[in-house]
Amino acid sequence: MSTPVCCHLLPDFVPTDALRGGVAVVIDLLRASTTIVHALAHGAECVVPCETVDDALREAAACSPGAAVLGGERGGMRIEGFHLGNSPFEYTPEAVGGKTVVFTTTNGTRALFRCRAARRVLVGAFANLSALVDCLATFDHPVHLVCAGTDGHVTREDALCAGGIAETLRERYNFGFADDVARLAVDAYTAADATETTLLTALKDSVGGRNLMVLGHEADIARAAQRDLFALVPEFLPNSGRIVVSD
Amino acid sequence: MSTPVCCHLLPDFVPTDALRGGVAVVIDLLRASTTIVHALAHGAECVVPCETVDDALREAAACSPGAAVLGGERGGMRIEGFHLGNSPFEYTPEAVGGKTVVFTTTNGTRALFRCRAARRVLVGAFANLSALVDCLATFDHPVHLVCAGTDGHVTREDALCAGGIAETLRERYNFGFADDVARLAVDAYTAADATETTLLTALKDSVGGRNLMVLGHEADIARAAQRDLFALVPEFLPNSGRIVVSD
């Protein structure tokens, strides 16, 4: 019997206690997941997700002088007084190397906290698809793909990424689908992924994609559509409140 | 501005008051929607959906002798003492012509009642896809495709049918998608519908499809996958509690 994959289109759709004993993968493709992968790939010590701007400011103030970088967004825009916004391109080795990235975004951060009950909480994006899938294959626990959505609404971009992860788990490691939501996500991914151009087109025509286009962040969508940019898996450690590179 | 289409993967996912002023289409492809279309196409006067078996028995007892036919299922099986189960093939002109079909199924009936607040409540299936789409195009109200699901779980078969309806509305009448759930349903339908064979394969590999395969009802799945068998639209009239052929 292969390990089953469940998919949840919103954190609110995860049944109570469903994550216990399982591995959760938080997906906020545009852009928190993608950006966290970039930050860790470019040498950040860790990423500290914070639910509110005030929490982030307090967290940064508690770090040694110069050790923390404040990053994140509200409504897709950089927060006043923060060093960085939420574009993966901002998280360069120069900006984040050796630093603690104190990070707050609207949907991705909330999704991470909602998944605390899982045995492991990983972060997934196209940017780390292969590494994530290879990592998941080493566990013997049910996998829950948890889409962050936007302000409580299902978003196509997160579902497409969940479908890509589920389909790759099936192809490479014979994972099965535990529910029809995983099948639908794979159907959606299959339809969009006939070519990488059509995947990008689908991502642009999504709740998150349209918001970013309006704000002039089209390049971020193209970046988020690129697969396997980095071979690492961010893991959220609820006890320490930190996201680090998983062993 | 084109009329928007929303999709809800479960009745429980419909936000409070979202249906007011809109047209709801209830989709329980395997098999209530498909069977209701067959019953009306084969001359049933009306279909009376009932939430419980007791309600159905009371409703039938209130009809003139011989005027009512009891139909429906629990767990995919005909209910003891009922004339008909929930296979579209049972609803022949001989069985239902001129009769009131008193009908109770687990998920479809509940979904109909949950949609009462809408301005109109229609029933959708592949069997009446074109007629439904042409009917929806005559209204100037938002369309809500409401998937019945199974026992509170999202099902691929209802989402695929919702995707087929949404995509046909877009192709023929330039309807837009009001949310990413409609886009995902269309993505899923597009992936499955490369050929009618692949649609049938997808339907068999769904929550409802697998249940029917176990019960030996494979022919019902093939029937439910056939498009445009009948040019009629069932409409639920909450005040009278009846489903009739829409004008």
Image (spheres, coloured by chain):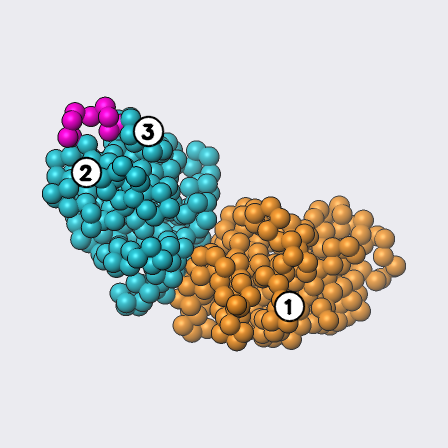
Chain colours: A orange, B cyan
Residue range corresponding to the magenta coloring: B59-67
The verdict on residue A200 being magenta is no
Discs 1 and 2 carry the same chain letter: no
Is the residue under label 2 in contact with that under label 1 (CB below 8 Å)?
A: no
In this view of the protein, which residue sits in the foreground, B49 or A35?
B49
Whether residue B61 sits left or right of residue A178 in the image: it is left
- Image check: A161 left or right of B159? right
Q: Chain of mark 2?
A: B
User: In this picture, is A177 found above or below B224?
Assistant: below
- Residue B179: percent from the left, percent from the top? 43, 49
Residue ID for mark 3: B55
Give the label on residue A233, or none. none
Whether residue A120 is visible here, answered yes or no, is: yes
Q: Alpha carbon of mark 1 to alpha carbon of mark 2: how far?
A: 54 Å
Residue position marked by numbered label 2 in the rendering: B245
In the picture of the structure, the residue carrying the numbered disc 1 is A139
Q: Residue furthest right?
A: A64
**Residue at 28% in and 67% down:** B197
Residue type, mark 2 in image = Val
Residue B142 in which image quadrant: top left
Quadrant housing residue A223: bottom right
In the image shown, does A91 or A138 lie closer to the viewer? Answer: A138
Please report the residue visible at 53 percent of the width from the left and 54 percent of the height from the top. A8
Mark 2, secondary structure of its residue: strand
Label 3's element?
helix
Q: Quadrant of the C terminus of chain B?
A: top left
Q: Chain of mark 3?
A: B
Q: Nearer the viewer, mark 3 or mark 1?
A: 3
